[in-house]
Image (spheres, coloured by chain):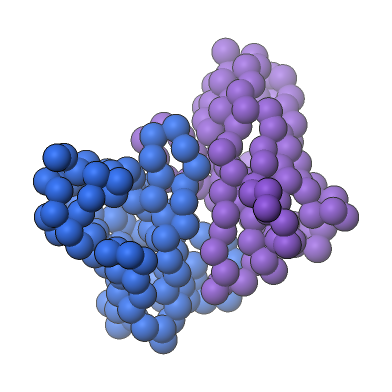
Chain colours: A purple, B blue
């Protein structure tokens, strides 16, 4: 039973560029949440996708956008990259985004901005 | 609203107990606990729902005090494998997102 998979594992970009991160949820899960985790900090919620729509959004600028596909996989896009965007980006999947369901995290994509 | 975790760090010897606290200034619907080891993904431990009971996972248990909007994680008879950073994630009523605390780093030594 495959867990949450994310790609790529590592990525190096320069300021001003754009990046796309990908996530495949755990089998049987239909909800995907994205988090940004800076070094030594807890994950910060970016947004959640359910039924191919953004259901909830955290305090992140519009440079951060996403998409969910019919097979429940998801992409996170970040435009006009800033040095402060360097972080570990985590994807978590769950079932219907219900409060009584655990979120399963992928190993993350380490994004470095030069 | 990010929850506040305490302590920031704790060092234990094998077999010792510890308590990690997580508090919110707003009414909570659920509290999720995760453990993250260095360079790895956070791993789910347990969920406590409003009105729910205390839960346990091996020798790790947790409680949720609705009146105080506070949850506590209890590490009993700690093992070396308990080392890592523990995060609480809180969900407000009618809100689908989890807000995580800054984490509590637990180091268990032989």
Nearer to me, A108 or B78: B78
Task: Residue B52 in the image: state x and y as whole percent.
Answer: 41, 83
Residue B108 falls in image quadrant: top left
Q: In the picture, which quadrant includes the C terminus of chain A?
A: top right
Residue A15 falls in image quadrant: top right
Horizontally, residue B108 falls left or right of residue A48, namely left
Seen in the picture, residue B86 relative to B56 is either above or below; the reply is above
Horizontally, residue B105 falls left or right of residue A37, namely left
Q: Residue at x 22, y 41 (%)?
A: B107
Q: Residue at x 45, y 78 (%)?
A: B49
Task: Residue B41 in the image: state x and y as whole percent.
Answer: 50, 42
Seen in the picture, residue B55 relative to A76 is either above or below; the reply is below
Outermost residue on the right side: it is: A70
Residue A58 visible to an observer of this rendering? no
Task: Residue B81 in the image: state x and y as whole percent.
Answer: 30, 46
Task: Residue B10 in the image: state x and y as whole percent.
Answer: 17, 46
Seen in the picture, residue B22 relative to A87 is either above or below; the reply is below
Residue A98 falls in image quadrant: bottom right
Outermost residue on the bottom side: it is: B51
Q: Which residue is drawn at 47% across and 47% down?
A: B42
Nearer to me, B93 or A8: A8
Nearer to me, B54 or A21: B54
């Amino acid at each position: 039973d495959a867990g949450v998979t994310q790609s790529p594992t590592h990525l190096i970009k320069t300021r001003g560029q754009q990046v796309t991160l990908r996530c495949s949820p755990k089998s049987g899960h239909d909800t995907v949440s994205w988090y940004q985790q800076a070094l030594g900090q807890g994950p910060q919620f970016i947004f959640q996708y359910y039924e191919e729509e953004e259901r909830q959004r955290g305090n992140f600028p519009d440079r951060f956008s996403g998409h969910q596909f019919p097979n429940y996989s998801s992409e996170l896009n970040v435009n006009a990259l800033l040095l402060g965007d360097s972080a570990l980006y985590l994807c978590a999947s769950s079932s219907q985004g219900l409060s009584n369901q655990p979120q399963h995290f992928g190993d993350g994509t380490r994004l470095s901005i030069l | 609203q990010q929850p506040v975790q305490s302590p920031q760090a704790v060092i234990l010897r094998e077999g010792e107990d510890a308590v990690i606290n997580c508090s919110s200034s707003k009414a909570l619907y659920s509290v999720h606990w995760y453990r993250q080891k260095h360079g790895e993904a956070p791993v789910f431990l347990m969920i406590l729902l409003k009105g729910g009971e205390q839960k346990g996972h091996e020798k790790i248990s947790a409680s949720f005090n609705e009146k105080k909007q506070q949850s506590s994680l209890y590490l009993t008879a700690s093992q070396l494998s308990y080392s890592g950073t523990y995060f609480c994630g809180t969900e407000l009523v009618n809100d689908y997102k989890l807000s995580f605390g800054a984490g509590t780093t637990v180091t268990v030594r032989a």
